[in-house]
Structure formats: structure tokens, C-alpha cells
Amino acid sequence: MKPAIWLDGSLRDPDSAMVSVFDHGLTVGDGVFETVKATEGRAFALTRHLRRLARSAAGLGLPEPDLDEVRRGCEEVLKAHPAAFGRLRITYTGGISPLGSDRGTAGPTVVVALVEAARRPDATAVVTVPWARNERGALTGLKTTSYGENVVALARAREHDATEALFGNTVGALCEGTGSNVFVVLDGQLHTPPLSSGCLAGITRALVLEWVGAKETDLPLDALYRAEEVFVTSTTRDVQAVHRVDGHTLPGAPGPVTAEALRIFVERAAADIDP
Ligand code: PLP
């Protein structure tokens, strides 16, 4: 499937859809984004994603996005590929600005791209990384296009045959992955780090909290080695069991708590496209 692109108000040929070399999203990472699951012409949890896009834009001081317009862009690309199993990538940037000036002058850039997605395996390996997430930074909790740190951490994961890297924060508490939130089972109880740990308010995380239930708990990073089960959540992974953390294996993954969380998540998500 060729990706479908909607750029600043209309569907474009993906081979000729262009963003300026002076777009602030490109030059300084002054942009925000969302990744939305698309199945058979429908976008999952789109309203929550649009609200988070607006929150991230406000946190970065970008002009308020026109969410009706972004929703229309999503609908148009989905209409172009009604059978696609993929991801809608929504990107909203500060717009075009000559290098050196502090913000775009020609209005924001809005891109919606539909790309195909691979089906994820049931269980995966993860690594911890020595770099800390800053739980008190200006960008904490915002889904900005400044993802360089995550790219570096993910490369570290791949060097160890893992698909995700988990960060602690500046006080050594478990935080999140490069593109996922993390849940841990300790003494049979499901826990996830609170938003104050510096993690993104993941939409899958929120749905697991609402539908399955878990305690929001500050945990040391090494809780991962003591856990009976670990799983990660994201739009691209849903609920995905972890079978290895660094050199430590979790035999039998997905364990019973993870399997039940996945079952409930899949059932509830199938019943409500925009929970
Ligand atoms: N944490 C980070 C840093 C992310 O980038 C993402 C998603 O890309 C998540 C967590 C999971 O969020 P969601 O469940 O909304 O996909």
C-alpha cells in the first residue's frame, strides 16, 4: 500500500507531498504528533488522540490546532484506504520560518499520513537504558516531534535483540518506554508508574487503567527484575507481554494477569471504536 497523505487541507499524491525545508518541525523539532490505530477504515480512540494533540500543542505554545480539520484529514485518508490495517500519523508543527527566528510565520503545518503496520508479536524483549527521563522538564508529558532521545534508546534495544527500551527518571523510578507505557505485576497486583514519573499519558495506559484496573505506584527501576509479569502498552502494541528484561527472563509470558488485561482490552476496544 502506498501511504495516503493529507497535507494542509487536501489529499496529496505521496510522491509529491512536500513540507518546506524551513518547517520548524524539521529544523528544531517544534511540533507535536499522534499515532492512531486504523482498522478497516476506522480510527480507534480518535477523540482522545485529538485532545492529546491539542494538549501537546498548548504545552509547546503552538497555535491551537483546528481539531475538526484534523479529524476531516483522518477521515479522508481512511476513505482513500478503507481496508487498511495501519496507523494514522498526525503531525502538527510550528510552520515555516527562516532558520534562526523563533517560530513559524506562515501558519502551522498539518499532515495526516496513513501507513501500513506490521502485526505485533504476543511477547517481546525489552532493555533498560542508562539515560533518565526528566520528570520535571518543559516537554515532560508532551508528545512532541523531538524524539531523538527515543531513537537512540531504541537503537540500544535493537542491539540486544529487544524491541523496546525502558527509561527510569531522574530519581531512579521506573518511567516508560520510548513509545510505550509499562505495567508490572508484583505479588499478584498490577502497577503502573504515575504520570508524575514523567511518562506520557498514554491512551492505551488510560484504557487499561479504566477497563482492567491497576495501581499507579512509584516503583524503582529494579522492580522490573522482581516482577512476576511485565507488559508494555501503546497504540501500536496494545497490551504486549515482556518475556525478557535485560538478561532477566520472565518464563511463561504472557502470564495470567497480562493475558486477562489483553483479553479485556481487545473485547472492550472491539465494542467501542471511540472510547
Ligand atoms: N510513551 C511514549 C513516549 C510514547 O511515544 C507513546 C506512544 O507513542 C506511549 C507512551 C504510548 O501511548 P499510546 O498508548 O497513546 O500510544
Image (cartoon, rainbow, N blue to C red):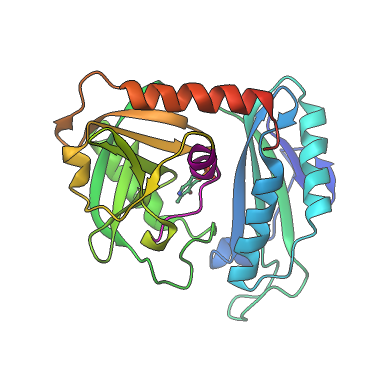
Q: Is residue 211 magenta?
A: no
Residue sitting at x 43%, y 43%: 180
When the figure is inspected, residue 59 is found, relative to residue 237, above or below; the finding is below
Q: Give percent across and percent down for residue 265.
A: 53, 28
| Marker count (numbered) | 0
Q: Is residue 205 magenta?
A: yes
Residue sitting at x 59%, y 69%: 59
When the figure is inspected, residue 103 is found, relative to residue 140, above or below; the finding is below
Q: What stretch is highlighted in magenta?
A: 198-210
What is the chief secondary structure element of the magenta stretch? helix
When the figure is inspected, residue 119 is found, relative to residue 189, above or below; the finding is above
Image position of 255 (left or right of 52): left
Quarter of the figure that contains the N terminus: top right
| Camera-nearest residue between 12 and 178 | 178
Image position of 248 (left or right of 55): left
Q: Give percent across and percent down for residue 167.
A: 30, 52
Q: Which residue lies furthest to the bottom in this view?
A: 101
Q: Give percent across and percent down for residue 100.
A: 58, 80
Q: Give percent across and percent down for residue 198.
A: 40, 61
Residue sitting at x 70%, y 31%: 273
When the figure is inspected, residue 130 is found, relative to residue 251, above or below; the finding is below
| Camera-nearest residue between 193 and 107 | 193
- The image quadrant that residue 156 belongs to is top left
- The image quadrant that residue 159 belongs to is top left
Q: Is residue 36 visible?
A: yes
Q: Can residue 23 be seen in this view?
A: no
